[in-house]
Amino acid sequence: MKTLKIIIVGLLFLGMSLLAEGQTTKSGTTVDIITNKGTITVLLYDETPVHRDNFVKLVKENFYNDIMYHRVISGFLIQVGDPRSRRSTGASEESIYSHEIRTIPAEINPAFYHRRGVLNAARMGEAVNPYLESSSTHFTIIQGRVQTDSTLNAAERRIESFYRAHLQSMYTFELKQANPEYANNDSEEKQKELQAEVDKKIAAKMIEVGSSLKIPQAHREVYKTVGGAPHLDFNYTVFGEVLSGMEVVDAIASVPVDRERPTEEVYIIRMQLR
């Protein structure tokens, strides 16, 4: 519990201090993602060691060999990593979206934001994932769109909404763990009492984080020139970036889809560490 709070809450302010200093990272582990559309070379950040080490382990185990991209949204992202989407198994759509996935702790650092070309860890929603833990295998590469001040302002509202939903889930979970009466009593009165306690905690936390959930001006400029998916900031783990091969990402993002799933096979042949 303590570690999770440090990751999710503490890094929020650490990340903002890094932003103030204008620091970026080029330190990490380089991986070639060889797909049937071409090769994407990525850097896994040393500042997100849990995600880096987990990814390296999967690469060494050849986990991603023959795995299909199962979610593609042009102008947003491409997603891969479902073990039941391996070409040899011919998995059904239901198996791709419904099975349980192992998670790893979030490493959310606002110094790493959702500009075009970053690696983002997919995750389950806030309601069932109170600490915003990442899928251990699913990841996306952000293609994104060029933003305007208007769309960035709308993204900030979504960021706050996501963050409040996270706090709602986290504080409800913690209060039920600490007070079995809340967990074991479904009466309307007791649930209202629980929600009142949650609301109090959310209000205090929102005052504490203050303007830190706003998109920094430097990031706004990148979003308005290079593009990205700003509404995901502060609520998902960014753990790497594309060094070369964004044209491959764009090619994958442009394939025909049916309900976000490619209608042609797009897959990872293999990955290799450099």
Image: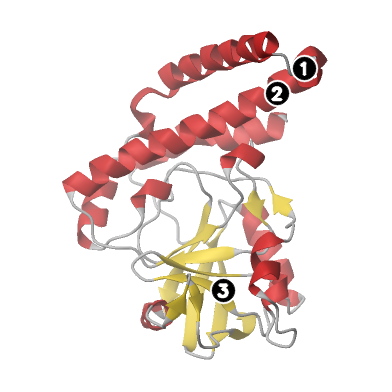
Tag 3–tag 2 contact (CB < 8 Å) = no
Residue shown at 60% from the left, 42% from the top: 132
The type of residue carrying mark 2 is Glu
Tag 3–tag 1 contact (CB < 8 Å) = no
In the rendered image, which residue does mark 2 sit on? 174
Tag 2–tag 1 contact (CB < 8 Å) = yes
Instruction: Please indicate whether residue 244 sits to the left or right of residue 266 in the image.
Output: left
Tell me where residue 206 sits by quadrant: top left
Which percent across, then down, holds residue 50?
Answer: 67, 53
User: Considering depth in this image, is 98 or 75 the residue closer to the camera?
Assistant: 98
In the picture as drawn, the residue positioned furthest to the front comes out as 188
The type of residue carrying mark 1 is Ala
Per the model, the C-alpha gap separating discs 3 and 2 is 34 Å
Q: Nearer the viewer, mark 3 or mark 1?
A: 3
Q: Secondary structure at mark 2?
A: helix
Residue shown at 67% from the left, 35% from the top: 4
In the picture as drawn, the residue positioned furthest to the left comes out as 149
Instruction: Please indicate whether residue 132 sits to the left or right of residue 230 in the image.
Output: right
Tell me where residue 105 sits by quadrant: top right
On-image quarter of the C terminus: bottom right
Q: Residues within 10 Å of mark 3 (few under 14, many from 20)?
A: many
In the rendered image, which residue does mark 1 sit on? 178
Per the model, the C-alpha gap separating discs 2 and 1 is 6 Å
Instruction: Please indicate whether residue 181 sits to the left or right of residue 221 in the image.
Output: right
The type of residue carrying mark 3 is His
Q: Secondary structure at mark 3?
A: strand
On-image quarter of the N terminus: top right
In the rendered image, which residue does mark 3 sit on? 70
